[in-house]
Amino acid sequence: MACEDRLRETAEKVFKDHDKDGTGSLSKDELVPLISCLGYNVPEESAQKWFDSIDPDGDKQISFEEFLEVILAQPPDDRVEAALRCAFKEADRDGSGNLSKDELMDILQQLSPSGKNLEQIVEDSDVNNDGNISYEEFWKSFAVE
């Protein structure tokens, strides 16, 4: 699968996960948590201005195509980090800021259902052998250099 196709697929999944009312578009209240998931901090006082800047038709809803346009406008390295940060935050079910080996295994099983070498990947990701994978360990294990 080409990188652009994978990015689109990932963006679509994240978009749908945050479309809480199932309308196929995001309101400001749905978009702000998604942006936070990607690692950006949008203060409440500037959220509306920011939302309006990516809502070119002014309908107060962000369509998937509008969202994708913003994602694709980011430099490639920023896109990779945002996708990894979002995957990490979603997998961190207990909100500890670290992934347990089970949480990391859940991500890997979604990406590679066959399970080949997944346990070794999990073990290799825990660089300091503390039983958890920090974001820094996660980044080093999965970012494409």
Image (cartoon, rainbow, N blue to C red):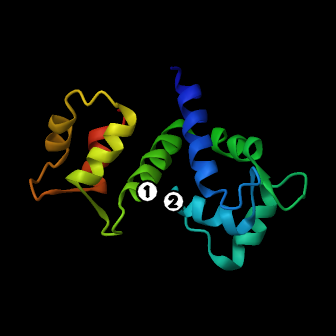
* Mark 1 Cα shell of 10 Å, populated few (<14), some (14-19), many (≥20): some
Task: Report which residue position mark 1 lands on.
Answer: 90
Q: Is residue 63 left or right of residue 30?
A: right
Q: Residue furthest bottom?
A: 45
Q: Residue furthest left?
A: 129
Image coordinates of residue 106 in percent, x first then y, are: 32, 46
Q: Give the CA distance from mark 1 to mark 2.
A: 8 Å
- Amino acid type at circle 2 is Cys
Q: Is residue 74 visible?
A: no
Task: Report which residue position mark 2 lands on.
Answer: 37
Q: Is residue 30 visible?
A: yes
Q: Is residue 43 above or below residue 3?
A: below
Q: Is residue 54 left or right of residue 93?
A: right
Q: Residue at x 75, y 49 (%)?
A: 24
* Mark 2 Cα shell of 10 Å, populated few (<14), some (14-19), many (≥20): many
Q: Is residue 22 left or right of residue 75?
A: right
Quarter of the image holding residue 132? bottom left
Which sits earlier in the primary sequence, circle 1 or circle 2? 2
Image coordinates of residue 21 in percent, x first then y, are: 71, 61
**In front: mark 1 or mark 2?**
1
Q: Residue furthest top?
A: 1
The answer to whether mark 1 and mark 2 are in CB contact below 8 A is yes
- Amino acid type at circle 1 is Glu
Q: Residue at x 57, y 48 (%)?
A: 14
Name the one closer to the observer, 132 or 44: 132
Quarter of the image holding residue 100? bottom left
Q: Where's the C terminus, which quadrant? A: top left
Rendered image: mark on residue 124: none
Q: Is residue 83 left or right of residue 70?
A: left
